[in-house]
Structure formats: C-alpha cells, structure tokens
Amino acid sequence: MFGKRWRLLCLLMLAFLLGGCYGRPERPLTVYTYSSFPPALVDAVVGHFQEEYKVKVEFKSFSDTGPLLNQLAREKEAPQADVVIGLDNNYLPKALALGVLEPYKPQAVGEIRPDLIFDPDYYLTPFDYGFVVFNYDSERLTEVPASHRDLLKPEYKGKIVIENPLTSSPGQVFLLTTIALFGEDGYLDYWRALKPNLLTITPGWDEAYGIFTSGEAPLVLSYGASPVYHLLYEDTERYKALVLDGGAYAQIEGVGIVKGTPYRTNARRLVDYVLSPEFQALIPETQFMYPVRTDLELPASFRVAAQAEQLFNLPPAEVEANLERWLGAWEQVMNE
Amino acid sequence: MKGHFPWHRPSRPNRLGWLNYIFPLLLLFFFFLPVLVALGEAFLPVEAWPGLLAFLRSRQFRKVLVFTTTEAFWSALLSLALALPGAYFFGRYRFPGKRLLKSMMVLPFMLPAILVVLAMVVFYGQNGVLNSCLALLFPGRKVSFTGLYGFNGIVLTHVFYNFGFCLRMLSERWERISPQLEEASAVLGAGRLTTWCRVILPLLAPTIGYLGALVFLYSFLSFTVVLVLGGYLYQTFEVLIYIEYNNKLRFQQAAQLAAVQMLILAVILTFQRWTQHLADRPTGAASPLPQWRLKKQRAGWIFFLFYLGGSLFFFFLPLFFVLLRSFKERGRPEGGWTLANYRALWEPAFRFAVGTDLETVIGTSLLLALTVGLATTVLAYLLARARRGLPWGRLDLWLQLPMGVSFLTFAFGLLRLAGGFLPPVVLIIWAQIFLAFPLVYSLLRTACREWGEELLAAAQTLGAAGWELFRTVEFPLLRKALTSAFAYGVALSLGDLSAVLVLGQGKVITLSVAVYRLIGHYHFPQAVALGTLFILLAVLLFTLVEQGAAGEEPWKRGEGSR
C-alpha cells in the first residue's frame, strides 16, 4: 500500500542526503568573498592558478561582509578558507580582534599608493579602492552643489537619496565623511539640517540608485566611478560624480591570508597575483574601482570618474572604537 | 481499514500512527532544529538575559511594536476588503480571460523586491505616472499624490503585494461553495443580505481569517519595502534583526530579537487557529460555474468592469510601466523602442555581470522551483491525507509556525547547523520547503478535510487501493487544490532571495540573484528585461498549471445539458 512506497521514498531521500555529505575529497585552495565580487575577476584568478600552478581555486561568497567575518571566526580552529578578499578598511579592527588573519607583506608593496595602506602590519593589504560620493543627474539638476554644506540648501528639499548607514556600506562611509568633516560635535547638527532634504534612505545601494535612475531624485549617494558605467554601456555623460569640499572618503578593499591555512605558499601566491599588474589592470572596468598600483594607466572611460586628491579617511582604530556609538546617536537624531 | 463501512466515520481514520504523528514530528524537527540552533545561542548564556529585558522596556521596542502591528493590520484589512468583491466574480462566474488574470495574481509575490519597489516609485512617485495623470486631469491646480514615502506608501505597497493573492485564494474558496446553498436559502425566503450574512460569510470566514493572518504575517516580516519607503522613520523587527546580524555582528542580540518576534507571531497564529476551528463546515458539492450573461446581469457587469479597471490601474499598471522600460533605449521612458535590452541578456556582458549564462540561470531557477513545489506538495499532501479525519489541531498549528519565524534567522541557523557538510543546493531546497510548507499544507489540509472520509472509504470498499485509489479517485477530486498548492510552492521558491544568498555560497544563481547582480553592474534596463522574461515564464507556467487543474473535473460532464 501507500506505506511501502512511502518508506522507499524516505530511504531514497536519506540516501540523497547522505550522498551529499559523504566522500568529499581534500579541499581546494579556497577564497572567501562577498556575493557581488565580479565573476570576471574570479575567472581570472581561477584561470591563472590552473595554468601556472595546476592548482584548483574555489571561491565561496557570502551575502555580505558581516556573515563572512562571522564564518571565519567560527572556523578559527579548523580554517576552511585560505584567502579572504573584500574586507575593507573599516572591518580591519574587527578582523584583528577576532584573530582570523595572518600577516603577509606582498612583493608589490612598493607599487601601492602609500596613503592607501591602512594596515602597517599587512594583515590586510589594499587591492582596490573607490570613493563614496554623490552623483547627480545633469538633466534634472541645474544648481550643482560644491560643498557638503551646500546640500543643506532648501532648493534640494526632497531631492537627495542616500543609503542607510546601519545597513549599507556606502551609507556608513557617508556617515564617517560627515564626522571627518564636521567633527564629533558637529555631525549630528549637520544631519538634523540634512533630514528635510532627503527623499528617502534606502537599505542598500541598489534601491537608491534605481530610484535615482528612474528620475525620481536628482542626487544620490553612490561611487566615484558610477558615471563610467553609463559612459561605457549607454554612451552618455548625463550622470556625473560630485567631489564636494575637494576631497572624498575612500573605501579601501583589502586581501588577506587566513590564519592557520594549510596552503600558505599558494595563499601568498594568490595575494601577490591580486596585486600583479595583470590582475590590477582588470579592476577598473570590472569592479569599477581604482587599482592600488600607481604604475598603471587608467582606461579612457575613467576620465568621468571622480578624482579626489584629498582623502577624508579617519584612522580605522578610531572608527572601530566609536562606530557603534556614532551609529546609535545618528539613529536617535533621525528618529527625533 | 476493511472494517469500516462507508457511512461509518471513524475518529481515527489512519491506523498508521507513525504517519499521523511521527511524520509530522519529523517535519517539525527538520523545520525547527535550525531555529533552535540560532536561538540556543541567544538564551544559553546567562549574561544574555538583562540585555533582552532592557530592550523589552525600551522606547524603541514599543515604537517598533506599535508601528509593525498597525502597518500589518492595515495591510491585511485593506488587502482583504479590496479582494472580497472581486472574489465574488471570480468565484461565481466563468468569463473569458479568467485563467490569465488568475495567473497574474501571484506575480508580485515572486518578483524580486527591488522590482516591486521600482514599480511603485515609477508609478506613485513624485515624478511618477500617477502624478502626470493628475496633472493632465487637473491642469493648473496642484493636485498630486505625495504619500509614497511614509506610512501610507508602506501599506499601499503591501496591499499591492498581497491583493492579487488574496483575491485568488478567496475566489478559489468561493468556487467550492455550492450556488445551490444560495438558491436553497432564497427558496426558504431569505433575502440577499440574510443569505450573504448567514450562509456565505460563515463559509468564507475561515479563509478570510487565514488570509488575514497570512497578510498580517508577511507585512509584519516585511523588510525592503519598509526600509525603502519608510526611510529612517519606520522599522520592523526584521529590520532590527538584519542590522544586528549583518552590521553590528551581534548574533546574540539578533537571535533574541528573532525570539521576541516569534513569540508575538505565535500569538497571531493562535488567533488564526481559532478561525480554522470554524473551517469544519460542509460547503456542499461544488458545481459548474455559470457563464456570465451580459444581458441578464448588466448592473453586475458594469460594477465588475469598474472594479477590474480600478484594480488593473492601481495594481497592474505600476508593474506594466516598469516592465515597459525594458523595451526602451537605455531604459528611459523618453527613449525609442528597442529589443536591445533583451538581446543583451544573451551577450557576454550578462555572463560578465552574473557569472553564468541565461540558460543556466533559467534552468536552475525552474529546476529548483519545481523540486521545491513538488516536494512541498507531496509532503503536505501525505500529511493532510493522513490527518483528514482529525479537526484542525495543535500539531497543525505548529506546522504553520514557520510563517512566524524570521526567515533570516532560519537561514543563518541552517547554515550553522548543516552548512559544513550539506551542498548548497540541498540547503536551499530545505529552506524553501520550510518557507512554502505552511501555505501549501493549509490549502491541502482544508481540501482533504472537505472531501472527507466517505468517498475514500467507499472507493476502498469497492476495491480501489494504493496508487490506483490516488489516480482514479483522489487526484481527480483534489486536482484543483493540488495544482494550486503546487503553484504557490513554485511561486514562493521563485521569489526567494534570502535563502539563495545566505545558503548558496555564490554557487547557485537563480533569476532573482541574476536581477540583483545585473543591477549591481548598473544594467538596470537589462535587469528589468530579465524581470519581464521572469514574469512571462511564470505566467506561462501558471497558465499551464491552471489548464491542468481545469482538465477534467468530475462534474463537468453534465455541463452541456445546463
């Protein structure tokens, strides 16, 4: 009757489940990253290692940097990854506190733009960076702001979309920008004044940029290289990046080696490859960030990207020590 | 079983106690183990408790609780109130285009949240279609809709999400209420209002209660919509949980919040159980629906056209306008017509942004959705069949509880529990079955209960058994409920993003993931094009399913003579 079939089905399902867990071979060289890491860069690494060293590389991606770091902490006793790509400058203190990385000073250190090196001990080495800046729609905005104070003018009421510092990394970088510019005493007043000009605050970049390009708001918090996409794929310079107050806060992404990796040699090779001219040259038009090497020429499309001479970056240790408090105060002010 | 006579309704229909009790317990085990893993961390350490108490006393907690409950209450009330009149027409009549309309009703359910949000912005936003229409209608006067960003916009979007689904579920229920009941009531001298209040409404009440609870829960657990439209002013518990998990990396706090949320939702579900108690009423055998006659029911026709026009305007046009942009150059409304955005889906740029080609993405999504749909339906059916003679009980309530669990919490718990040894695909299927099971089960539970014991017992007495019994008796009777349940399972799987992102390790790329990846590479028009393909595919799939459901209904044979 039905029972017999049912028992058979159960057995089959069990076999399927067990089959999944049984007989896994030795794990390949494993890289942890976040889910939006460009597939083209993954292919470059995998291809290079296959060709050069006959080594299989596997990428595992996480929904965000937070869960990635958590996974590393969880596997501390028996690491399941060897290299981690994409922890940015603001995550360095957390990673150090968890003790999940080991230092490695790559061969190409001399070629990296010096003010980007945010970790003097090389637990994390920068491999690309970008500016978090406002972008504007030149067809809908006539009066272009020149400073962060300008954004407070009543003419921008309901015209600005930003990301939430609590849920999104560009949002968080913007909060840090205001702290870098106006100090701990001034940033909350700035936000109080900015509030009426914000159309909305979105959880992530996707929604903010979608609202921006659908013509709903002419100013959006995005990246310095965003206009490059529109130039490359839509052949338009309608959308432009804004450098306010002559500088910008940089989001610097790092690569590091997982503490206790059984494949130290290959992990180091991987870090070196990520900093090699070959890989660095791929970054601008795949990741839409700047390469960290100073000896590379940027592609022509990058003439529309934001160029910030001055970096507003706060020291990572200061950020780590205060971020939670800053975010809490921000949340309170926004809820007033 | 042989000892039972058809007219003798046994209290325990199934002697296989293990199917009746052990099997559901096993299901519960698989559903709740990941949740327990996540929650265990929250409550085992003693130092965790004071923090929780402080949170419960905080102003923030009260604020979030009040906002979330109010928002969810209005979303549920409005979705149902708007769906009820339509359910009458869809449940009582046949008319051309009905099948297509019904297929369209589940669409918002499966769309990536970002497309829904964009649809709302494009239509209801400051520079949206609605405001252009208002400007045309009232030139010179400043009439405009400005309520999208705030409480009203949140409720509006939740109604947008759930309205069609409520309409569909309610009309499916209404179809099963025999019109002869109304006729009988009329013959006995009851007026239309009396008939409605005393005959129809009590029969619909359990479904209304269930849907109300469901929409309430979905809105309670809402995330993207609340954040995008609410800005900084409004937060749900799910938002707080996400922030704790993702940004503050305080897993203990996140799990505690999830536990609090679960408790609140358990209360709601208990209420829903109470409404399900009322479900044990005979509805009479369903009979063929009358074709709508224009001449006889002119007033009804006009009302229905208004209703349909209104719902299409407010709930379908937003989707339509955002999808329209995929046929425009660079996705701009003022641009010329083009198919370039669709061609781009087959070009290397797609692989470049998404990581694999379009065929693989569609194949993965379909395979995953069909597997989840089938597995959930089979599991739910077996259980519903085994428990068909029992009234809706505590165990059934427990099986509804996945609806009240923060899906994020479940996914993280599952990752921790089994992420080390199970392949990502298995984890995703596990999570999506968890997601779809309550709805599918409740549908089949009601259906199995309605057809009751007698028919099955009669068929068994006549010698039918096993597969043959299923094929010849049960399946034809339950065809509609089974296909509908299957469709909902498929829809929920297609629409899921969290499980795939959290558990997929970047190896499983479904349509929703691809949409997000395209957007992440600034390919908005292509993302919308993919969304459009997604919708066409889904409509096709569901129309086929509907077709299957309408295949041969046992009572259809006598239709010609009516």
Image (spheres, coloured by chain):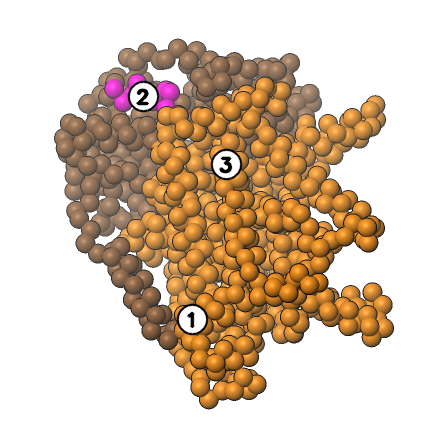
Chain colours: A brown, B orange
Q: Residue furthest bottom?
A: B3
**Which chain is home to disc 1?**
B
Q: Which residue is mark 3?
A: B533
Q: Nearer the viewer, mark 3 or mark 2?
A: 3
Specify few, some or many for label 1: CA neighbours under 10 Å numbering under 14, 14-19, or 20 or more.
few
Contact? badges 3 and 2 (CB < 8 Å): no
Cα gap from disc 2 to disc 1, whole angstroms:
62 Å
Give the SS element for disc 2.
helix
Q: Which residue is mark 2?
A: A282
Magenta span: predominant SS is: helix
Query: Which amino acid type is marked by label 1?
Result: Glu
**Residue numbers of the magenta segment:** A278-286
Q: Quadrant of residue B311?
A: top right
Q: Quadrant of residue B553?
A: bottom right
Give the SS element for disc 1.
helix
Query: Which amino acid type is marked by label 2?
Result: Leu
Specify few, some or many for label 3: CA neighbours under 10 Å numbering under 14, 14-19, or 20 or more.
some
A230 and A33: which is toward the camera: A230
